[in-house]
Image (tube, grey):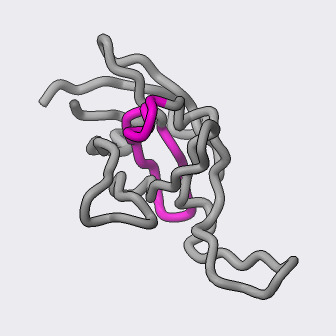
Amino acid sequence: MEKHILCHKDKMEIGDKEIYEIGRTSVVLVRTHSGYYAIRNTCPHQGGPLGKGVLQGAALPSDVGTYCYERKGETIYCPWHHWEFDVTNGLSIRKPESVKVKSYKVEVEGENIVLYA
């Protein structure tokens, strides 16, 4: 695996996302309450830019006019058709057994956020 230094660890706040180009691949780096995660910046549905989507929780069944979420800040929604993906592993929220986005290993090394691809 090749090592790519993305940014200083203090650049991102919890809930932030940044898009980076790694060679010819676009990835979105996300900082959650539990750490840093990176997934490919392309929705498998029709190629929407996931890094331009909303980062929030997975919607739970709830009453009309009420919105309840679990795992806040760990679900990214495609801005084109609202497909949902878990940023910690790239799995689809609705069909994790068959739909996913490539995820990447991310580590904090010293003062840097490093992606391995």
Q: Position of residue 103 (x, y in %)?
A: 30, 45
Residue 106 magenta-highlighted: no
Q: Position of residue 49 (x, y in %)?
A: 53, 30
**Between 9 and 3, which is closer to the camera in this rendering?**
3
Q: Position of residue 15 (x, y in %)?
A: 65, 51
Q: Residue at x 79, y 87 (%)?
A: 63
**Between 99 and 24, which is closer to the camera in this rendering?**
99
On screen, residue 87 above or below 78: below
Q: Residue at x 29, y 42 (%)?
A: 102
Location of residue 40 (image quadrant): top left
The residue at the far left in this view is 1
The residue at the far bottom in this view is 63
Q: Which residues are magenta?
A: 29-47
- The N terminus - image quarter: top left
- The C terminus - image quarter: top left
Q: Residue at x 66, y 75 (%)?
A: 69
Q: Position of residue 66 (x, y in %)?
A: 83, 80
Q: Residue at x 43, y 26 (%)?
A: 6
Left or right of residue 13, residue 40 in this image: left
**Between 62 and 74, which is closer to the camera in this rendering?**
62
On screen, residue 88 above or below 36: below
Left or right of residue 34, residue 81 in this image: right
Left or right of residue 10, residue 43 in this image: left
Answer yes or no: is residue 46 visible.
yes
